[in-house]
Each structure stands twice: as C-alpha cells, then as structure tokens.
Image (spheres, coloured by chain):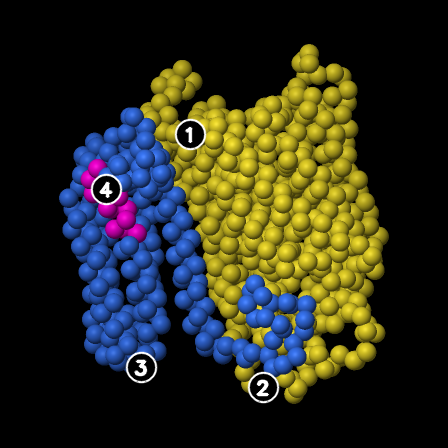
Chain colours: A yellow, B blue
Amino acid sequence: MEYTAHDESIFVRPAEVGEMELYHPKTWLGKYVFCQDAKVIAIQYAATALAIGLVALVLSWFMRLQLAWPNTFTFIDPAYYLQAVTMHGMIMVVYLLTALFLGGFGNYLIPLMVGARDMVFPWLNMISFWVYFTAVLLLAASFFVGGGSTGAGWTLYPPQAILPGTPGSEAGILLMLASLAVFIIGFTMGGLNYVVTILQARTRGMTLMRMPLTIWGIFTATVLALFAFPALFVSAIMMALDVLLGTSFFMPAIVSMGSEAEHVGGNPLLFQHLFWFFGHPEVYIVALPAFGIVSDLISVHARKNIFGYRMMVWAIVIIGALSFVVWAHHMYVSGMNPYFGFFFATTTLIIAIPTALKVYNWVLTLWQGNIHLTTPMLFSIAFLLFFVNGGMTGLFLGNSTVSMPLSDTLFVVAHFHMVMAVAPVMVVCGAIYHWYPKISGRWYHEGMAKFHFWTTFVGSYLVFLPMHYLGIMGVPRRYFEITGTTFLPESAHAVNASITIAALVVGFAQLVFLWNLIWSAFKGEKAPGNPWNATTLEWQTEHTPPEHGNFGKELPCVYRWAYDYSVPGHEEDFIPQNVPPRSVTA
Amino acid sequence: MSTGTGIFSETPWIADTGPVAPALSGAEIALKSRRSALKMLLSVVSVFFLLMIVAYGGRMLYQDWRPTPQINLLWANTGVLLLSSLCLQFALMGARAGRILWVRNGLVAAGILTVLFLVGQWTAWQQLTTLVLGDFSNPSVGFFFMITGVHGLHMAGGMLALVRATKRAFQPGDTHKMEANISNCALYWHYLLGVWLLVFGLLFSGNNFEILLRICGVI
C-alpha cells in the first residue's frame, strides 16, 4: 500500500487552513522557563508532578515501615504518621495524578491529536503551570513550618482539622488550604484552555466523533474538574475563614483541650458535602483520562480498531455526568436520611453499567487482535486487571449496608488504591512508554522497562490484595499502630510486614523507571517518527520530537477516525488519519 | 464527510469520500475562543456561587439561625452596579453603531461606577463590622463577608479587562474592531450584576427564608 500523506489536490481546497500566530521566544528564559509551547509546558507539569509524587512515595514508605515494625523507627511518631498519611493522599490524588493527566498529558496531546498548532491561549497556559508550581511550593513549605504539615487526613474534615491536638492545626492546615486554592486557580486557567482548544481549534475533518478516545477522556475530565473544583475552593475559603477570622461555617460550639472554643453553630457536615461534591468527581477526573488513553494504547498495540467507539464516547460522558450525583456514598457513616442513602447507593451502582461496558469493549478489542506484548500493552493489560479488581470491591462499598462495617478498615484503602491509584498509574506508565519515543526522539531501555513493569505489577498485587483480607478481619485504617489488640491474630501482623516489603520493592522499581526516563533521553537509541505504526496525528508530524507549531507548513487534514488498524484489503495494518481515501491503495 | 454529521448520527468508522469542510480562519478562531472561554468561565463561576447559596440555604435550616443585620447601603450599591452595566451596554451599542464617543464615555463611566460599587461594598463591610462588634461567629455574617468578598474580587478582576478595553478605545481605530472586547466586558458585567441581584435579593435584602427553602426543595 502507498500513502500520499498530504494529497491536498483531490479533496481539499487550499489556503483555508485555520492558523494561529505562534509565540516565538527570544531569550533562554522564554524558551525553557516561561515557555508558551504546550509541549514544553506539558514536560514542566509532568516533571513537577513526578517530583512531588516522589515525596509522596517516600511518605508511604514511612507509613508502611511503622505499620510493619511498630516503634522501630524513632523518627515516626503518631503525629508524623498522620502527617505522612495526609500528605501522601493529597499529593497523590491532586498534585500528582490530576496534574499529570490534565496538565501533563493534556498539554502534550491535545494540540497534537486534534491537529492544532498549540493551545488557543498559550500565555494563559504558561501562567497556569507557574500557578500550579506555586501551589506545589506552598504545599511543600508546610513540611517546614512550626507544627509541620497538616495531619487531618486527606479529607481535611473539620472540626478536628483545625483544632489544637491535630498535627499541623496552625500553619500546616492554612498552607494546605492556600495551596489547594492556588492549585484550583491555576487549573481553571489550564482547563479553560483545554476545553476551548478541543472545541474550537480542531483541524479540518477532525469532527468530535473522530477524536481519539484519549482526547475524549481528557476533555470530559477537564469539564468535570472545572465544575467540581469550585466546591473544594469554597470549602477551602470557608475553613480558612473559620481559622483566621473566627467565623463558624463548619465549626460547632465545641470544648477543645478543656476550654470552650469561640465558635458557635457551624456545621461540619456541610464541609463533608462540599468536599465530596468535589471528591467523587475527582476519582473520575483521574480515571477518565486513563480510560481514554488505555483505549488508544490497546487499539494500537493489538492492531485492531477499538470495539464500540461510539459506546465508549458516550460511556465516558455518562460516567462523568453520573459522578456528580453519587458523592454522599462517601458519607454513609456520617449519617443521613435513609432515602438519601438509597438514592446515593442506587446512583453509585448505576455507574457500574457504563464502566462495565468499557471493560467489555477493551476486552473485545483485545479479542483476536494481533496483540504485541510491548511495555505499553503490558501496562494496559495490568490496568484492566487492577481496574476490574478495584471495581468489584467498589460494588461492596457502594452498597450502604456493606459499606458501614468496612468503612474504617483497610478494605477501603485496598479498594481505592486498586481502582484509583494503581490502575491509573498503570496507564500513566504505559502512556509514558508509548509516547516516550515521540517526546524524546529516543527509545527507552527495554530491559529496565520490563523490570519496572513486572516488579510494579506483581508487587502492587502483593501490596493491595492481602490488604482486603486485613480489612475484612477488621484492621482499622489511619491507626498509628495495631499491636496489643486481641481480635487480630499474629498472621495479620505478618501480612502487614509482607505488604511493607512489597511496597518498598515497588517503590524501588519506580526509581528505576525514573532513571530509565532520564538515561534514555541521552543514551537511548534514536526512535523513528512513528515507531508503533499508529494512526493518530501526533505520530504524523514532520519532526520527532515535534517542533513548536507541531506540524509543518500546513496543518494536516483528517479523513478518517483514529482506529483504522488491520483494515481488510490493505497491505499495511494501519491507515493514518490524514491519509485521503484515494491515496490508500491495496 | 462521513455518513451523518451530527454527534449522534455520525459513523466515524467510515472515511470521507467528499470534500472536507473548511476550517475557521485564525482570526475567527481567536475571537470565538475568547467568547467560548468567557462563557465556560462564567459557567464555572456559576457553580461557585450556587454552592455558596446552597450552603447558606442549608445552614439557614438550623434553629439557631440569626440573619445578618440589614444594611441599607446595599440598595444604593445595587443601583450603582446596575448603572455601570447599562453604561457598558451603551458602549457596546456605540461600537456597533461606529460612534466612538459613546464607546469612550460608556467605558469610562462603567469603570468609575464599578470603582464606586467596590468602595460602597467596602463601606458596607465596615458598617456590618461595627454592627456585630467584630464578632464574626454568627454564620450569616460569615456568609455575608465571604459572598460579597468573592463577588467584589470578581468585579475587581473584570476591571483589568475593562481598563484594557478603555485604553484601546482611546487609541485611533475602527470601533467595529473594538466590539468583541467590549461585548465580552459587557457580558461579564451583566452576568455579575445578575449574580449580585440573586445574592442580594435572596440573602441580604430581608428575610427571604421561605423562598430559599423552596429553592432548596425543603418545602
């Protein structure tokens, strides 16, 4: 088969290509620091997110060391333990995963995949990153202030979050709230950019229903985030005012440390509603980009068109919409009208339908595909396993009667790490390996990548599968130590120790991963422009890595969807999106 | 195009067999993008204010609710904000009709009135602080400061765009080219006026407890 990649003469009238004026940096600072190229901003986002994520990883090691061998490590006291729990959770959910999926992958992939030169507001995009960076600095600063960072748990529930006795109840909590508010401002700038770029800067022929599922996932997650983050913003402002001005939004009349606090009549449940109105969509803000990306990874590496594309699109949109009406399933133990409980349990279980539909479609895409067990594909398959596992335990917890006894146990920790931590991280890793040759122009080291995969895959199972059983046995979460309890057999402690060993090994594998990325950027073998024979536009650029402006003199024109793999009657097993029909010959 | 062009009817797995629709030109993309981004931003801001109003309504249900003392200055501030919004509409009409004086006067007047509104709100804050003797523990007082503060910050942020549009209006040029910027400013002002009328009418202009309960679906 022969392709004529830009055969404009047949169908397309020339000189009607939408163009935008590009920013041309004049200084080193303008090119590498305050750069307005979305691809550079993407790398800045990713590097910052991975750096602060590394801090959260180390915090998880401290937690695990304490749980496995209580009181062996003298620097871990109860306050420090709670601070580690809190900061690990918040960093991983907001500052790593959200920033990496939307700021990192969003910035790199949106303009390239929709056929645009750049984001529509490049300056705002640059500012968005630096605001995010400031938020990370504020968060990191809380480690060093008097009293340390907040130890209120990542949900920051009042009244305990701001009462004396909780670690970091002075400067720590304020820095956390300030950091979150700044993060949300930065995200809103970026989010508006992503949405408007997708809606208005797509190249010719790139209809909404021809967009790769990666873009659908990022788009829907961005819309979700734009509408969910205001709830966190409002609650952060209200809690900050409770601390600073002595208002009583969330603080009831309360006796604290033997004396009456100045607050009267605040409502702590109001915070929980606001927090989870953000918190549950947040799960999907992380999950939906992962759903989109993994769909593309599976299709490319199984050399098959995605099964049920339109269903996949609508499933993403429906999951996004439903995620706004399930928030109170996080509050079953807080107490609520039983009818509300019934409503939220029902909506929660309904989400399983479009989600299961996606899982079936991924499996059916793999079915009889020409599966290449590349590193991205291995991570994609691992995602499926972790996601199905975590999804099944979600059915337990979505049901209010089953959820109540399990709510404060390690079962919940195991569930959400399976579904919301490990599963998306599998996609993050798979996606980085998949697009690494395009981003860096070089191949990653295959041996290190395979070591990274198998250690992470097996190790993560060894961490989180046994944790479910500990939860069912009644091992509580958030506890500094569980020694001296009569209801737990010695084997529970042995399992805890084995989980810690597995966690340390998995953590080490992530260091190998990061080293691979750095080493390969300089020493890796040169990669061709389209090493996976993929169809989407980012692989059709003139240069690898793509230059500022992404495409050559003319923007590509799209004639087909992103999934023309193994099309019957064609020699090669892929047809890029920008290949006109008459240029495709058998 | 592939069979069917709507988002529901399109069959994306069928490749094009005819000409591909032309794209927008670069200038059109820029103009449409700004308008779309503004509309998206206003949707996000709507969620933000809605959540605060719902939180306020939810808190009102408790028996110990004590409403905010009435501040009559807010009526005057509302009038000033209404006038500033009208002035921007006047400037927009001028831009459309090609009358530069209308544009300049409208923009300058809108700016002055907005500053006046912000000063008025600040004065209302001082009055309330005096009335409650600096005790902010009453939730309705806390809500008053938060909601008016956030609204004021949005107005102040809008001033940046308004100053830019005004500077542009005092440079020589075709008024039609100024229309997009002025139209965006006007939309923002009208929107924030709407938010203020809602917030003021519902929460701070008297006892509208029953109306709020109806909105929150309680009665």
Q: Which residues are magenta?
A: B195-207
Contact (Cβ within 8 Å) of mark 4 with mark 1: no
Residue A531 x %, y %: 78, 66
Reading the image, the residue beneath label 2 is A14
Residue at x 45% of width, y 68% of height: B33
Reading the image, the residue beneath label 4 is B204
Three-letter residue code for mark 1: Pro
- With A428 as the anchor, is B69 left or right in this view? left
- Between B73 and A547, which is closer to the camera in this rendering? B73
Residue at x 62% of width, y 48% of height: A354
Contact (Cβ within 8 Å) of mark 4 with mark 3: no
First in sequence: mark 2 or mark 1?
2
Residue B168 x %, y %: 31, 74
Badge 4 sits on which subunit?
B
Q: What separation in Å lies between label 4 and label 2 (alpha carbons)?
A: 59 Å
- Disc number at residue A268? 1
Figure check: A235 above or below A125: above
Reading the image, the residue beneath label 3 is B174
Three-letter residue code for mark 3: Asp
